[in-house]
Image (cartoon, rainbow, N blue to C red):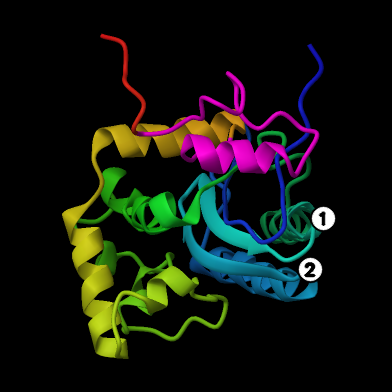
Amino acid sequence: MARLPRLTLPGFPHHVIQRGNNRQAIFATAADYRALLHILGENAGKFEVAIHAYVLMSNHFHLLATPQTSDGLPKMMQALGRSYVRYFNESQRRTGTLWEGRYKSTLIQSERYLLTCMTYIDLNPVRGGLVDQAADYPWSSYLHYVGQRLDRIIAPHALYWELGNTPFAREAAYAELVQSGINPVQQSALTDATLSGWALGEADFVADLQKRTDRRVAKTGAGRPYSVNRPHKK
């Protein structure tokens, strides 16, 4: 069966996962994390992609991003992947591939899943057992959103601004969201939708998406989206 093209539409947030080949480490030093963020920032600006959230793990990374053009996200990811592999291979005196094939991505419904996806991303180091609290991990967007660091890569989504009328109120509200966490069903839905490439949202949202593209957006058709609210078989 032919592989479907990625689902990418301008103006919608996309959750992106890029993994190291065979789950190998993609960072060897702190300088490597900084290098990837620098390359990401440069190419996000160049290709008009707003980065709402990120986390860099030892062998993969997540992004939550909204492209302004139809090809902005794939061009950004292509440029990021090539530039970082060149940097990493030179610094580690290695050759060959670094990534596990193509990056994975899905388009999500902002109103239902954007803040949940941000929380999912910022809790990755906690779920992975690297830290006890999201604030203890330096390589994510969390510290920016709780006012502990200014991260120029980040372009907050409008839904973040709606968390409060002042910076302190927004920071406190977001910290509370992350502290509350997400349930296993939401976590599974975000992971599975991203790895499969099917849109994540309610039926009306997915049906509207299908009108905007010739690419099939849901596994079972536009009327039955991949959603955390769908009943699960026992």
Q: Nearer the viewer, residue 130 or 145?
A: 145
Task: Please name whichever residue, 46 or 190, is drawn nearer the observer in this view of the structure.
Answer: 190
| Relative vertical location of residue 78 with respect to residue 99 in this rendering, above or below | below
Q: Could you tell me what secondary structure mostly forms the magenta stretch? A: loop
The residue sitting at 42% across, 33% down in the picture is: 227
Residue type at mark 1 is Asp
Q: Badges 2 and 1: C-beta atoms under 8 Å apart?
A: yes
Q: Position of residue 140 (x, y in %)?
A: 42, 65
Q: Quadrant of the C terminus?
A: top left
Q: Is residue 24 visible?
A: no
Q: Residue 95 appears in which quarter of the rendering?
A: top right
First of labels 2, 1 by sequence position: 2
217 or 74, which is in the foreground?
217
Q: Which residues are magenta?
A: 199-228
To which quarter of the image does residue 172 belong?
bottom left
For disc 2, the marked residue is: 47
From the top left corner, tell me how far across and down residue 128 is, in percent: 31, 44
Is residue 122 left or right of 38 when viewed as pictured? left
The N terminus is located in which quarter? top right
Question: Is residue 209 found left or right of 145 in the rendered image?
Answer: right
Q: Is residue 123 visible?
A: yes
Residue located beneath label 1 in the image? 71
Q: Is residue 63 magenta?
A: no
Q: Is residue 37 left or right of residue 73?
A: left
Mark 1 crowd level (few <14, some 14–19, many ≥20, 10 Å Cα): some
CA distance separating discs 2 and 1: 8 Å
Element under disc 1 = loop
Q: Secondary structure at mark 2?
A: loop
